[in-house]
């Protein structure tokens, strides 16, 4: 009997007949370039730092580096101190300005109050004087001397008018004939401003509309009767 031919397919497949894809074990793929050269770079940097440190110590340059750092720290501290001083100075100036403004405001208020008081006192004095003048002007004094001058040529006419004034309460009235120049119409003359009210009352009593202030009269009030 002939032996059957044995081939690969004659055996039942197992785990080893389906291996994982890609190289494994000793046949791994190559690593990236940066990963392979990183250790060399680190070694070079460390060696350079060590060499620089040795050079700085041996040449004394490390002292200059330390002094530079100290100077930078001092400069920063000085700048901070100046800024704080400027801030304090600004606050002080602001406080001084506020105080000066308050002082000026108080001074202005005091001056305004003083001026107001002075003006009020002046106005009060002026008002009192005006009131007194008005009171004097408005007061009718029937004891004032009144002279009635007859310029009409009618005998006894001045006496009649004098009687009218006496009847109304005047106590010092006399009738007289003209001795100088006469006005063109009937008028009541008075000399002082204080006699104005009395002169007006005399004119009203006698029905005379013209009342004038004249200087140089021999009596306070003179009534000139004309045609």
Image: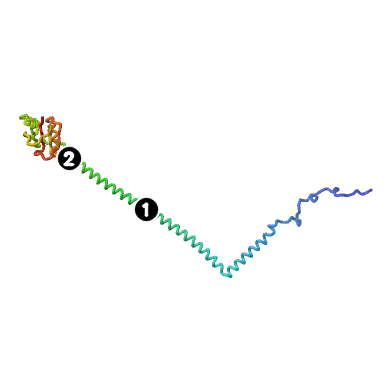
User: In the displayed structure, does residue 106 sit left or right of residue 208?
Assistant: right
**Colouring convention used in this rendered image of the protein:** rainbow
User: What is the number of callouts on the image?
Assistant: 2
Residue at the spot 87% in from the left edge and 49% down from the top edge:
7
User: In the displayed structure, does residue 73 sit left or right of residue 50?
Assistant: left
Q: Name, please, the residue furthest toward the right.
A: 1
Q: Distance between the residues labelled 1 and 2?
A: 52 Å
| Crowd class of label 1 (few under 14; some 14 to 19; many from 20; radius 10 Å) | few
Q: Where is residue 210 in the image (x, y as percent from the top left)?
A: 15, 33
Q: Quadrant of residue 61?
A: bottom right
Choose mark 1 or mark 2, whichever is in front.
2
Quarter of the figure with the C terminus? top left
Mark 1 lies on residue:
97
Q: Name, please, the residue furthest toward the bottom.
A: 58
Say which of 68 and 129 sits in front.
129
Q: Of the residues under marks 1 and 2, which one precedes in the sequence? A: 1
Q: In this view, does 206 lie above or below 191?
A: above
Say which of 141 and 185 sits in front.
185
Q: Name, please, the residue furthest toward the left.
A: 155
Mark 2 lies on residue:
133
Residue 70 tag number: none
Q: Position of residue 113 (x, y in %)?
A: 28, 47
Q: Where is residue 214 in the image (x, y as percent from the top left)?
A: 13, 38
Secondary-structure class at tag 1: helix
Secondary-structure class at tag 2: helix
| Crowd class of label 2 (few under 14; some 14 to 19; many from 20; radius 10 Å) | some
Q: Kindly check if marks 1 and 2 are in contact, taking CB atoms under 8 A apart as contact.
A: no
Residue at the spot 78% in from the left edge and 51% down from the top edge:
19
Q: Position of residue 86 (x, y in %)?
A: 43, 57
Q: Is residue 47 above or below residue 27?
A: below
Q: Quadrant of residue 165?
A: top left
């Amino acid at each position: 009997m002939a032996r059957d031919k044995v081939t690969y397919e004659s055996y039942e497949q197992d785990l080893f007949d389906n291996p994982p894809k890609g190289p494994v074990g000793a046949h791994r793929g190559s690593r990236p370039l940066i990963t392979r050269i990183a250790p060399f770079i680190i070694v070079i940097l460390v060696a350079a730092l060590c060499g620089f440190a040795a050079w700085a110590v041996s040449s004394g340059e490390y002292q200059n580096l330390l002094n530079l750092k100290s100077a930078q720290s001092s400069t920063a501290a000085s700048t901070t101190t100046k800024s704080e001083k400027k801030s304090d100075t600004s606050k002080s100036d602001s406080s001084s300005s506020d105080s000066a403004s308050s002082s000026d405001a108080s001074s202005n208020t005091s001056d305004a109050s003083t001026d107001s008081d002075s003006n009020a006192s002046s106005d009060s004095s002026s008002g009192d004087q005006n009131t007194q003048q008005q009171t004097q002007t408005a007061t009718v004094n029937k004891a004032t001397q009144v002279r009635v001058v007859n310029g009409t040529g009618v005998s006894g006419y001045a006496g009649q008018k004098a009687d009218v004034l006496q009847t109304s309460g005047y106590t010092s009235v006399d009738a007289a004939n003209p001795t100088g120049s006469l006005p063109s119409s009937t008028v009541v003359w008075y000399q002082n401003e204080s006699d104005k009210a009395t002169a007006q009352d005399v004119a009203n009593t006698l029905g005379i509309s013209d009342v004038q202030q004249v200087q140089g009269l021999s009596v306070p009030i003179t009534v000139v009767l004309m045609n």
